Image: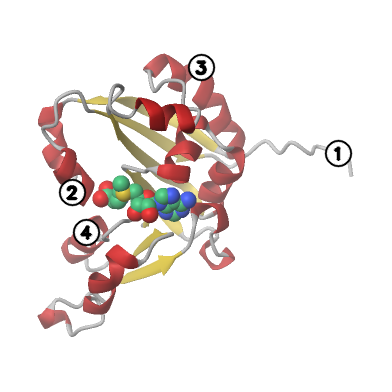
Amino acid sequence: MIDIGTGDGFFVSECARQNPRKFYIGIDANTQPLEKISEKIHRKPSKGGLPNVLFLQAAVEDLPPELDGVADEVHVHFPWGSLLGAVATGNEGVLRNLRRICSADALLEILIGFDPVRDVSELKRLEIPSLSLDYIDSFLAPRYVNAGFAIIERGVLPQSEWVKVQTSWARRLKGRAGRSLTYIIGRATDKSHSKASAPI
Ligand SMILES: C[S@@+](CC[C@H](N)C(=O)[O-])C[C@H]1O[C@@H](n2cnc3c(N)ncnc32)[C@H](O)[C@@H]1O
């Protein structure tokens, strides 16, 4: 499982503790919040070590080729900045990067928490017009399809369901009035539609 924009790595380390037979990779462009946890995972398992975890510094725009095809699940939780802009506007290069690290039939889970009033200037800066279900269906879905993902589910999680989301930002934002959590679940398809379709 690969978690992009992993932040402090809490989601990855909790999942890894609960599923010792699965391998987890947390990726973030910023390593500062990962300093403690990326030292801790190398301890003995009895002292909190997690041999089934790896943390990597990388931007989603530039994922290492060694990750190609390795993930059965890719998660993007509470993205901000360029990561948010990319998944919420269907940036072709970034979606193709996410597809490239997926195995056949892999699942992609994106959770976006936003407040249409407080985040208005950031949404404007990132050129995100809306995150309505209609926008997802009519604008984003075809872009995801082009990059090799079929959107199989999307919706808005009620506040009561936030407790099930095991990330630091879910805990931080939980209960804040006005903030909604939009989810998009995609499945990797075996075809992505390349722009360059020149005959051989
Ligand atoms: C709000 S935090 C969410 C952290 C974690 N997923 C959580 O739910 O607690 C957003 C994270 O996305 C990362 N990020 C933003 N743009 C990125 C990019 N282009 N590539 C990789 N990570 C990025 C930031 O460094 C930050 O750690």
Q: Which of marks 4 and 3 is in front?
A: 4
Q: Which of marks 1 and 4 is nearer the N terminus?
A: 4
Looking at numbered disc 1 in the image, what kind of residue is underneath it?
Ala
Q: To which quarter of the image does residue 48 belong?
A: bottom left
| Residue at screen point 26% across, 81% down | 42
Looking at numbered disc 3 in the image, what kind of residue is underneath it?
Ser
Q: To which quarter of the image does residue 78 belong?
A: top left
Q: Position of residue 50 (x, y in %)?
A: 23, 74
Q: Name the residue under label 1.
A: 198
Q: Mark 4 points at which residue?
A: 10
| Left/right of residue 192 with respect to residue 134 in the rendered view | right
Looking at numbered disc 2 in the image, what kind of residue is underneath it?
Gln
Q: Which of marks 2 and 4 is nearer the N terminus?
A: 4
Q: Which of marks 1 and 3 is in front?
A: 3
SS label for mark 4: helix
Instruction: Find out if the beta carbon at label 3 lies less than 8 Å from the nearest ligand 1 atom.
Output: no
| Residue at screen point 37% across, 32% down | 184
- Quadrant of the image for the C terminus? top right
